[in-house]
Image (tube, rainbow, N blue to C red):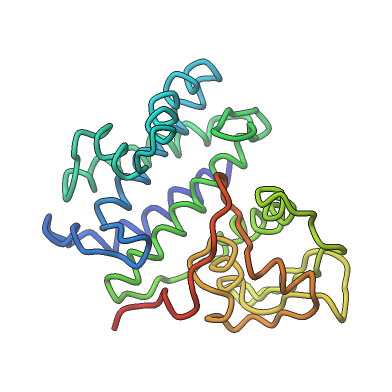
Amino acid sequence: MQQANDFREESLTLKAVIKDLDDGAFEAVTQFKGWTINDVFRHLHFWNKAVMVASQGEEAFGEFFQGVGAHMTKGGSLPEYEKQYLEGLSGGALRSAWSDLVDETANAYAAMDPSARVPWAGPSMSARSSISARQMETWAHGQEVFDALGADRCEHDRIRNIVVLGINTFGWTFKVRNEAPPEPMPYVELVAPSGELWTYGDLQEDNFVRGAAVDFARVVTQTRNVADTALTVMGDPAETWMSKAQCFAGAANPPPAKGSRFKVA
């Protein structure tokens, strides 16, 4: 399954930017909810563990998820639970454990039937969508790490998996907010990192999103406010969507405020 290799390659790109960090540098605070780099990698590592358990079936995943669900119901924070579950794993040891599990996860999903159903915190997903979601999470949370370290990421056309998640969750963006999706769904025209043109939906001259695929991915993963991108957004449905787009599961989450997410100089 190509998406499993894309997840691996996305993780390797992220690994490269942290390979020389000492343990103290992992305590640097990012622009994402005050999370440290340790928090980011514990989060990625925990949910990579979760997707491996999910590949074993609904019963195994239900047992795994019970703990985090109970913790959140009591008002606990996700980073707090992840740190507790991973017994405070941090720094170089965390980097190694995360990297090893990335390989294990990619190998496991590469061998799976892409259409096999995999349980998750919300609705079940296909194995293809599940591992694509891991790539999306790695890319999205990787953004706050690259930003915190003042580094640029070399983007690749594998970002198309994230773009497709963004397109496919148009309705989810509104459902999670108990809102009706605006109609019609906007036309989307994006330029890939390679320069290839990607289009989605029917051409509409008064309802569209156009620009770089990377900018679109940043908006739907909420790593940038749409106002901080070069996207061209035309029409009420398109503007409404881009103002709150959310391609990930969980409760409704507001996008970052304009100017609040950027590469540190």
Quadrant assignment for the N terminus: top right
Q: Position of residue 93 (x, y in %)?
A: 17, 43
Number of numbered markers: 0
Q: Where is residue 15 in the image (x, y as percent from the top left)?
A: 31, 56
- Residue farthest toward the top in the current orientation of the protein: 59
**Residue 98 relative to residue 137: left or right:** left
**Relative to 96, is 40 above or below?**
below
Q: Position of residue 218 (x, y in %)?
A: 53, 68
Residue in the foreground of this view, choosing between 213 and 194: 213
Query: Which quarter of the picture shows residue 170?
Result: bottom right
**Residue 184 relative to residue 16: left or right:** right
Query: Which quarter of the picture shows residue 33?
Result: bottom left
Query: Which quarter of the picture shows residue 185?
Result: bottom right
Q: Where is residue 26 in the image (x, y as percent from the top left)?
A: 19, 57
- Residue farthest toward the front in the current orientation of the protein: 74
Residue displayed at 18% across by 58% down = 27
**Relative to 226, is 40 above or below?**
above
Residue displayed at 47% across by 18% down = 60
**Relative to 83, is 227 above or below?**
below
Residue displayed at 32% across by 74% down = 151
Quadrant assignment for the C terminus: bottom left
Residue displayed at 31% across by 38% down = 82
Residue in the foreground of this view, choosing between 251 and 206: 251
Residue in the foreground of this view, choosing between 154 and 255: 255
Residue in the foreground of this view, choosing between 124 and 17: 124
